[in-house]
Image (tube, grey):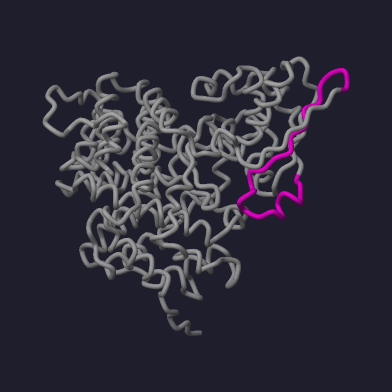
């Protein structure tokens, strides 16, 4: 049985966009936003350096890899570019803190930046403007692949951050290497055939954290190999047999190829990337916001709650609505009941609330078991943009019942302010790096368009890399000055 190759209109359309994208053609709103998104991802990656799963990878890969080329963020280590990308992506995704795109179901920073920064380290003198353009290329392509595949992709058991993420990483790395359209087609095709990631990892295993790192590594491989002349699947999205879309949907129609290139260069998906202000899966955030709002209006505590009912989409039900068992931090951060119990008991759901000694706390588990998730077909029918919508009922002792509907998590609705993102970065990075270094890194990222060599970002990501002397133009300016420069 033969399967003649389909055309590659969409794969090539993406490649043309990536290879031709110029900083000066990107709207200022987008370049300003991506600097903040980059800052957020780097903070997550630095914080992740001291986590158990990160240390295991750092140690074992350090034993296997004698290359000392690229920084492992938040440490004094260096490894080869592919291994640094693997670890750094794992660290960004290491504690459920990193960004998310609602429709694309993708953590863009965790897959784009580890690959792109490795390129900047391996190919010196990538300017800050070129770095920003490459970052936008990755942040634009990844969500479009996720939108193309739709909610069914994750419902079928694929972890989209890993499967879709390879294309975001490949796009960013290809633009960082200044690949032409033809080589970018091959970079996408090489990355796509490495795509994989199983959602069963969410129930407690460390490997869930590694999915983003593996996607970053695969995307980097795609760009580096294509640059050397290695070829990939030229119609990786369109192929009727064995293409990404047909294979991962197990169909020839449960995906939308047109979404891959719709609005490229005019509708910016980067602006739809949202920053997390809770250290747990994004599908829990709407419920947590509902609980916060109800508590602000009605003074009730843990002892007053008899039951909480969360009516939600099928996607949320399957993703976070399962019965909690203390199987590790991953399970806790991806379980709605546990996260609600944590918020009620401690008043917050950030990094300090998720520790090993709390996972099997009988009081927390008992409260988590009072949270019931129920599928609401009406919410599911509203489409993927409402997949995190919830209707929350809090039943109190004495018979009172409080209700709140949240369509999109309030704390993510405006994608977080600059002040919130900077504060989050400083909090997370400050767990690992000295204050002066955190400030230098912050200013470098927020002033990236003035950097002659984006590899400076990587240098500032290493532990103990405070710069003692500041050259002219090295340090970022205040908000008003940045706006003046970019005007």
Q: Residue at x 49, y 41 (%)?
A: 274
- Is residue 97 at all visible to an observer of this figure? yes
For the view shown, which residue lies furthest in the right direction?
399
384 within the magenta span? yes
Q: Is residue 314 left or right of residue 80?
A: right
Q: Is residue 415 left or right of residue 401?
A: left
Horizontal and vertical percent for residue 65? 24, 41
183 within the magenta span? no
Decide which of 426, 326 is in the foreground and name it. Answer: 426
- Is residue 67 at all visible to an observer of this figure? no
Residue 324: quadrant of the picture:
top right
Residue 77: quadrant of the picture:
top left
Q: Is residue 411 left or right of residue 233?
A: right
- Quarter of the figure that contains the C terminus: top left
Numbered disc total: 0
Q: Residue at x 30, y 57 (%)?
A: 25
Horizontal and vertical percent for residue 124? 15, 46
Horizontal and vertical percent for residue 261? 44, 65
Note whether 409 is above or below 231 in the view shown: above
Q: Which segment did they paint magenta?
A: 375-399
Horizontal and vertical percent for residue 348? 57, 21
Decide which of 238, 200 is in the foreground and name it. Answer: 238
Q: Residue at x 63, y 22 (%)?
A: 360
Note whether 15 is above or below 404 in the view shown: below
């Amino acid at each position: 049985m033969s399967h003649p190759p389909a055309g590659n209109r969409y794969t090539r359309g993406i490649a043309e966009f990536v290879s031709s994208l110029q900083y000066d053609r990107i709207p200022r709103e987008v370049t300003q936003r991506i600097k903040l998104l980059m800052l957020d991802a780097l903070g997550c990656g630095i914080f992740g350096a001291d986590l158990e799963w990160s240390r295991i990878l750092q140690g074992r890969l350090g034993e296997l890899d004698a290359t000392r080329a690229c920084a492992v963020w938040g440490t004094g280590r260096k490894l080869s570019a592919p291994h640094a990308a693997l670890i750094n992506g794992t660290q960004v995704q290491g504690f459920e803190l990193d960004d998310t795109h609602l429709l694309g179901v993708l953590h863009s920073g965790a897959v784009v930046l580890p690959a792109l920064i490795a390129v900047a380290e391996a190919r010196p003198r990538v300017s800050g403007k070129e770095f920003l353009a490459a970052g936008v290329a990755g942040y634009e392509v990844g969500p479009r692949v996720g939108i193309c595949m739709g909610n069914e992709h994750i419902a079928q058991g694929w972890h989209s951050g890993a499967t879709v993420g390879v294309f975001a990483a490949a796009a960013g790395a290809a633009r960082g290497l200044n690949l032409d359209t033809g080589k970018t087609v091959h970079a996408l095709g090489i990355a796509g055939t490495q795509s994989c990631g199983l959602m069963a990892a969410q129930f407690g295993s460390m490997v869930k954290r590694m999915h983003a790192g593996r996607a970053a590594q695969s995307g980097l491989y795609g760009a580096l190999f294509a640059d050397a002349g290695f070829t990939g699947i030229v119609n990786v999205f369109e192929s009727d047999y064995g293409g990404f879309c047909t294979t991962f949907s197990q169909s020839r129609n449960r995906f939308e190829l047109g979404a891959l290139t719709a609005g490229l260069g005019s509708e910016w998906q980067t602006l739809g990337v949202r920053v997390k202000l809770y250290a747990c899966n994004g599908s829990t955030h709407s419920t947590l916001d509902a609980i916060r709002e109800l508590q602000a209006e009605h003074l009730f505590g843990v002892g007053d709650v008899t039951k909480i009912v969360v009516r939600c989409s099928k996607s949320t039900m399957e993703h976070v609505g399962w019965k909690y068992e203390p199987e590790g931090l991953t399970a806790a951060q991806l379980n709605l009941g546990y996260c609600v119990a944590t918020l009620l008991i401690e008043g917050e759901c950030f990094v300090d609330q998720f520790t090993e000694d709390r996972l099997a706390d009988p009081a927390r588990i008992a409260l988590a078991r009072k949270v019931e998730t129920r599928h609401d077909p009406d919410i599911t029918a509203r489409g993927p943009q409402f997949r995190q919508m919830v209707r929350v009922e809090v039943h109190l002792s004495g018979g009172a019942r409080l209700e709140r509907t949240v369509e999109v998590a309030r704390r993510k609705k405006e994608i977080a302010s600059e002040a919130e993102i900077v504060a989050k970065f400083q909090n997370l990075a400050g767990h690992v790096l000295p204050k002066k270094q955190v400030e230098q890194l912050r200013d470098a990222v927020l002033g990236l368009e003035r950097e002659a060599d984006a590899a400076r970002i990587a240098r500032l990501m290493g532990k103990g890399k405070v710069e003692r002397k500041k050259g002219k133009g090295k340090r970022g300016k205040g908000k008003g000055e940045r706006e003046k420069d970019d005007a």
